[in-house]
Image: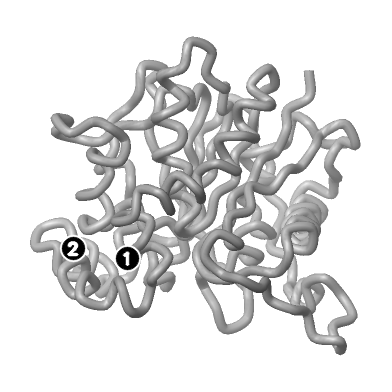
Amino acid sequence: MYPIIIAIHGRGNKLPTTTLSAHWQQALKHGLQRYNQSQLHPQIDFKMAYYADHFYQQPLVLSAATTTAIAQIHTIKPLPTYNRHDNEQPIPLSAPPHWATKIAEWMEDKFNLFSFISKPFLKSLLPDIHYYFHDPSYQKAVEQPLVKLLNQYQHRPIILLSHSMGTVIAYNVLHQLSRQPTPPQISTWFTFGSPLGLTCVKGFLPKITQQPSVKKLATPDCVTEQWINVSDKTDIVCIDHDLSDDYLANRHQIQPQDCYITNHYPGNSHKSYGYLWSDVIAKYGIPKVTL
């Protein structure tokens, strides 16, 4: 049985759902072509869990001058092709972090510094994330598209792609669905540019995942094979880039595996397209189901 790819986008207003879905697929296919010289099998479906319309009244509009779905996609030079055996585990994809980044991560882990600084600005600068944590009706509304898709395709292996705020939504939804008698099976879960390592985010998770007494967070049980956490060291949204020390293994012994890349999207190391067309998915996500 062929898997299905389900994706959930990040915070902020977005292009209409069909356009955004087409862009993600184009970036994904471009990455596969660059690194695997392959393409998605035609029987692999792609579905987008779109929730931006629950906060923004009107979607973004493409400029009339746009001639390609992702204007920057063809300016990116391919990196050397890398081949691996199926039994190999993900490894860091770049050199160890710069000393300044290590200090920043240590300060966040020990003193919650960046989380503390971010709290006063959360409501004004990131209102959709603020409302997600503080408004139960909004939380339920933005989770529903993903809940619906995961339940609809629970009989198929699922590859879940999530970006930014979408990784937080996905974490909560996966915990909820893991309690079902027949939960969906997430063979591979990708988190791109995820804030799940920030203390100010982790502090809300036990409550909204209905685990108020949990002492340390864990991988949702419906993730059955791998959780690949991908970040660019200059992406400030995921200043704590390492989730492997923040989340325990689930009953399948799956916990986050941290991979570092260079997000080549021009001028924005947090951009979803740059993560999607990196070599990570070609290496670890869909090599078994491409043509």
Q: Amino acid at mark 2?
A: Glu
Position of 123 relative to 11 (above/below): below
Which mark identifies residue 108?
A: 2
Residue 268 at x, y = what percent? 55, 78
- Considering depth in this image, is 36 or 166 the residue closer to the camera? 166
Residue drawn at (42%, 56%), measured in percent from left and top?
194
Identify the residue under disc 1: 239
Of the two numbered discs 1 and 2 on the same chain, state the one appearing first in sequence. 2
Where disc 2 sits, the SS reads helix
CA separation in Å, label 1 and label 2: 8 Å
At x 53%, y 12%, the residue is 182
Q: Are marks 1 and 2 in contact (CB under 8 Å)?
A: yes
Q: Residues within 10 Å of mark 1 (few under 14, many from 20)?
A: many
Name the image quarter holding residue 6.
top right
Task: Look at the picture and state if 166 lies above or below 128.
Answer: above
Q: Is residue 93 visible?
A: no
Q: Residue at x 50, y 33 (%)?
A: 89
